[in-house]
Image (cartoon, rainbow, N blue to C red):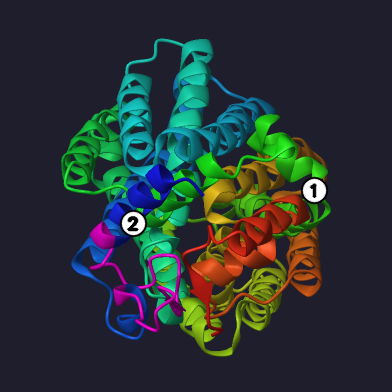
Amino acid sequence: MSQETENRTGSLDARQGDLPDAGLGDADLGEGRPRPEAQADSAPPSRQAVLVAVAAGLGYMFDAYVVNIYSFVLPLIAVTFALTSTAQGVVGSIMLLGYAIGTFGFGWAADRWGRKDTLGVSILLYGVTTAASGLAPGTGIFAALRLITGIGGAGELSVGVPYTAEVWPRRSRAVGTGGVIFSLYAVGALLALLASLALAPAYGWRAAFLFAIVPAAGVFWLRRKLTESMPFLRARELAASRVTAAERRGRVREILTDRNLRRRLLVASLIFTGNAVGYWGFLVFLQKYMIAEFKLSFRHSLALTTIFYAAMMIWPFAGALLADRVGRRPAGITGAVVLATGSLVAFSTHSLAVYVIAQVFGIGCLGWTWSVGETYVAELFPTRLRATGFGLGVSIGRIPAIAGPLVTGIMATQIGIGNVARWFALIWVFLIVGYLIGPETKGRPLAELDTAAEPATRAKAAAASAGCGGGRVHQRGD
């Protein structure tokens, strides 16, 4: 490593001192002196770590508002634009197409230009287009705006999760990266419900969309107080001095051509195929199902949905705590089994009471599976590729989900929404398989995770550099 790069890296190390587990865990400086982040590893999260998690979570909360408001007021939108069930599914799928594009695009941008600024662009893009959707004169413009909204909103997950994973202490990383962020997603869904109950009946569905500009502005202001991820800056500095031939061809190609990274990408894709398809396969039509099956009013169906999303606020922490205690893999598999069982019971009963109890575990445990899944996938890729790998894996998983609302809309007219929803319970097999073939990452420092995930070519280059006296950081083990 050149002296200039060494000096730059050292300055980054000094600036990272207040962040627990800033990417090197139990590493030392080569003179037997532990790094500040290693000493703080078991301490509570730093102020900046909490700010990053909350800022990312609030953005995801707003994303939840933007995403779920469509399904909550769909019966009213369908009347305004005279949409058939198939057309309703098409519009829902169009936004998910934007999600797939944006998840990868913003993840790639975060590894190229940094976490903080990329998050700022995300909130501005989908905040403005959501409000504009409330002014759409027809189906075509409304659908186009939902596509752009999906692209912008996807950045909240693909940037916010890796960002938080890099600054949160490793022993409770799932709580910060999964519990905090996804519980706030559930809060956003509840806000969308409240807006649907308070604004839509009195002022129409358009008012619920126009209201979105208010929280968007607040989140954008809060994010101005963030600082860039120090592990990311350090990794970028080190990568500049150890560029391999594969890296010159691009981050995506490197992930796709390296055997180790490709396997991790498969794991990520399987987990988020289950998460995304399982979430969107039937939730878009949840209100329609309750209204038709249990003869509820529109307001009554929304009130019951409030219970389900309140449960979704709690389950992310339950899943995250279990993941930090016993491991990501057993926690993720447990959540999927509970969720699938709850869904099968809910869509097989004609009793409203049984349905509500079952969906507390069914819809509620979506928070569990997403909380554990997003933490785990962020840990699968090295810091310099984390957002790209995370975004690519989640994006691939979301591709089948694009067809979810469309397929549900078509099949619902043939066999009914309840039968379709029961079949969708099988999708959680993908998630379970992903965890079974993936490595365990619980409690491991970012440096150790980076070493395990790096391609063989880069590992050899790093070893050669260390052998020539260029390596300043020595790993002592967890």
Q: Left or right: where does residue 256 sit relative to residue 369?
A: right
Label 1 vs label 2, nearer the camera = 2
- Which residue is drawn at the image coordinates 75% and 51% (left, top)? 457
Q: Say which residue label 2 marks.
A: 10
Badge 2: few (under 14), some or many (20 or more) residues near its Cα, within 10 Å?
some
The percent coordinates of residue 143 (x first, y second) are: 52, 20
> Dot 1: what SS?
loop
Vertical arrangement, residue 390 with respect to residue 350, above or below: above
The percent coordinates of residue 428 (x first, y second) are: 74, 65
Q: Which mark is residue 235?
A: none
Badge 1: few (under 14), some or many (20 or more) residues near its Cα, within 10 Å?
some
Is-magenta flag for residue 21?
yes
The percent coordinates of residue 283 (x first, y second) are: 57, 51
Separation of residues labelled 1 and 2 (CA atoms) = 30 Å
Vertical arrangement, residue 419 with respect to residue 136, above or below: below
**Residue range corresponding to the magenta coloring:** 14-36
- Which residue is drawn at the image coordinates 40% and 41% (left, top)? 69
The percent coordinates of residue 346 (x first, y second) are: 64, 70
Displayed quadrant of residue 441: bottom right
